Image: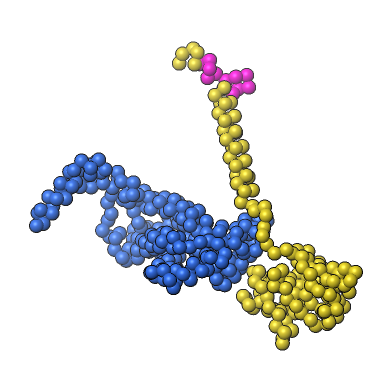
Chain colours: A blue, B yellow
Amino acid sequence: MSAARISMADWLRGSAVYRSIVRHGTADTNRNRSLVIFENLFLHVHPVKVREKTLRFSHTYWLGGVTLVSCLVLIATGILLMFYYHPSVPQAYRDMKELNYVVDNGLFLRNLHRWAAHLMVFAAFLHMLRVFYHRAYRPPRQFNWVVGIVLLIVTLFLSYTGYLLPWDQLAFWGVSVGTNMAKEAPLVGEKIRFLLLGGNVVSENALLRFYVLHCVVLPVALLLFLSVHIWRIRKDGGVQGPPTDADDPRQEEAE
Amino acid sequence: MSEESERRESPGPAGTSRRDFLTRIGGGACAVAGAGSLVVTLDFLKPKVLFEPPTVFRAGSAVDYPEGTVRFNREQRAYVIGGGGGVFALSAVCTHLGCITRYLSDERAIACPCHGSRFDLEGNVVHGPAPRPLPWLEVTADAAGNLVVDSSIIIPHGKVTRA
């Protein structure tokens, strides 16, 4: 039975269609295993070889991975929510209610989106602390630290723009307060608030603008910087876990 | 290098080769076009027509405001108040972070529900976090004594309108 299954897999991998997509045969040599990673658009950001040590939970607490997975959950649930949501007044609030009480599994998907959003911000923040305390921001990873900061800011903006979309009292006043904070920025504050809201008060224009930012502009920016972030991990020699004694400058002085 | 290409690459009278000159012209044109599209895009993002409530509203007659009357206008977010010397209008938008304040009639105070700022009936901050007093708004009275408030015009503190 199992032998038959293996030969089935071999036949599939040897078939003309499979070979036209993947180009190399069964990944049974180290060279082929490497090629599978190298020549795949989605896998090439990932290192070909990973040390077993770096996969342990205690090495990174998987915080970057948790952030990434919650991001994927958010994209999946977000796309589904978009099928029911109209970014207009007062339809937005009704759609949110409809998702909660009428649509099959709507409540589950909306809550999943909400909790994954909280988790993503929380995990991103812990990931940042982990990198800091493990001194993983040091050369050669200093550029990736900066990319990470950009990702954190984009994540916070995503979280904030999503906050307005239910169009309830909490959303309305949350965004009133937040855009008034933006107004306090020197020189350009007033203009930023006007552009962000598409007017002087939180209105239908603001809802549409936040929707476009939340569903198009910011996710595209996030995916772009996320790709660079993960690709740089590979380029910088994989994830760095806790510093070893050899990395400690005090140790070198002692010698 | 052949004689001809040497001639073509050689610097002109100003010390610039033709290729350099054309590269700069091309680069400059791209920069101008890029800056232009940025300006046009920013301009596009600024709405030209806003469907927001008008800033001017009628507040009735001055005789409707005996001393101590406070009326809240929801749409323009303003209080019209009868003071000792006449009528004045206060913005109801908290100077802290833009929430709408509420008049508490039994305490004769204006309070913000968001972060707890309190103001007296002349708009002065009683306690924070509000950093500035509530702005006074322009009130005009026509010959018949009808009051018109413009919430977009801020006037100095303490300037009341007599009927």
| Residue placed furthest toward the right | B143
Residue A145 figure quarter: bottom left
Residue A250 visible, this orientation: no
| Side (left or right) of B45 relative to A70 | right
Main SS of residues in magenta? loop
Q: Where B15 sits versus A151, above or below? A: above
Image x and y of residue B152, in percent: 75, 63
Image x and y of residue B85, in percent: 87, 78
Q: Nearer the viewer, residue A57 or B30?
A: B30
- Identify the residue shown where x is 69% and y is 69%: B75
Q: What quarter of the picture does the N terminus of chain A occupy?
A: bottom left
- Identify the residue shown where x is 62% and y is 19%: B13
* A45 within the magenta span: no
| Side (left or right) of B2 relative to B70 | left
Q: Nearer the viewer, residue B19 or B114?
A: B114
- Identify the residue shown where x is 64% and y is 69%: B97
* B13 within the magenta span: yes
Q: Which residues are magenta?
A: B6-16
Q: Where A143 sits versus B132, above or below? A: above
Q: Where B87 sits versus A45, above or below? A: below
Image x and y of residue B45, in percent: 61, 51
Residue B53 visible, this orientation: yes
Image x and y of residue A101, in percent: 44, 73
| Side (left or right) of B68 relative to B5 | right
